[in-house]
Amino acid sequence: MSVLRRLEAAIERAVDSAARFVFRGPVSPAEIGQELLRAMEHSRGQGSEPGTVANRYVVRMAPADREPLAPVAERLCSEFEGFLYAEMRGNGLRMVSPPVVMLQPAGDQPASAVTVMAEFVTGVPRFTLVDCSPGATGVPGAYEGRALLGRSPECDFRLDTPEASRRHALIEWSDDGFVLRDLGSANGTALNGQPVSEALLSPGDVVGIGLARLRFEHIK
């Protein structure tokens, strides 16, 4: 399956049947994805560090083409962001923070065509951890750049489970993306059900520490 076909399949899963009209519009998700890839590749070498690519992508569309996408724009942008993030990592590239994609109506844009503006935006990347453990409220906590997880009062995310060490694990931004590191804990750390000592994180990944389950998400 091609990269763009995988993108379309992911979008098909993300939108409900009533929103499948996005595949029948004048601009298809695959066309937007192709232009995003081209913009990312073109931005390579334009950043301050070798191998760094743009992290903000503005998709300019004719207003008549953008309007039908309004009900699913947020979900589409989320899928495009995950798509770019995966391609960036798969090609050994880096971003200064997780990608942001916006669908912008532009009166000077020809119909049935898109133009992507790729930009480098600096700043400390942010993320959330949503507690999805059994019986948890699911209220997310927001963090900038890093978060220490454990039972100690000094931790950014306090874990109320006996299996957790006082300083159990660390999530922090690196040149390759957000990294989860086990800090030599007694009972270990899992990512999507698999034991890890260090691993790159992607949106939607679930960190497991004892009975605790924390879903990782980027913040735009």
Image: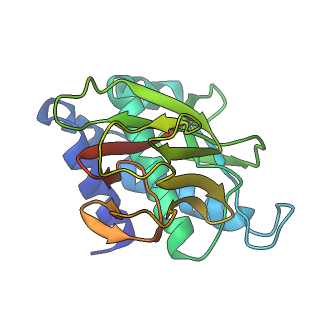
Residue 181 picture location, percent across and down:
51, 63
Which color mode does the image show?
A: rainbow
Position of residue 140 in the picture relative to residue 52 (left or right)? left
Quarter-of-image position of residue 77: top left
What's the residue at 35%, 26% (across, down)?
68
What's the residue at 46%, 54% (across, down)?
168
Q: Nearer the viewer, residue 108 or 69?
A: 69
Q: Is residue 184 above or below residue 104?
A: below
Query: Is residue 113 visible to us here?
Result: no
Position of residue 87 in the picture relative to residue 130 (left or right)? right
Looking at the figure, which quarter contains the N terminus?
bottom left
Looking at the figure, which quarter contains the C terminus?
top right
What's the residue at 41%, 49% (across, down)?
203
Q: Furthest residue to the right?
A: 48
Residue 74 picture location, percent across and down:
41, 31
Quarter-of-image position of residue 6: bottom left
Position of residue 74 in the picture relative to residue 220 (left or right)? left
Q: How many marks?
A: 0
Q: Nearer the viewer, residue 163 or 135?
A: 163
Query: Is residue 49 visible to us here?
Result: yes
Quarter-of-image position of residue 93: bottom right
Q: Nearer the viewer, residue 161 or 119?
A: 161
Q: Nearer the viewer, residue 31 or 205?
A: 205
Q: Furthest residue to the left?
A: 17
Residue 67 picture location, percent across and down:
42, 23
Position of residue 76 in the picture relative to residue 48 (left or right)? left
Residue 191 picture location, percent across and down:
33, 61
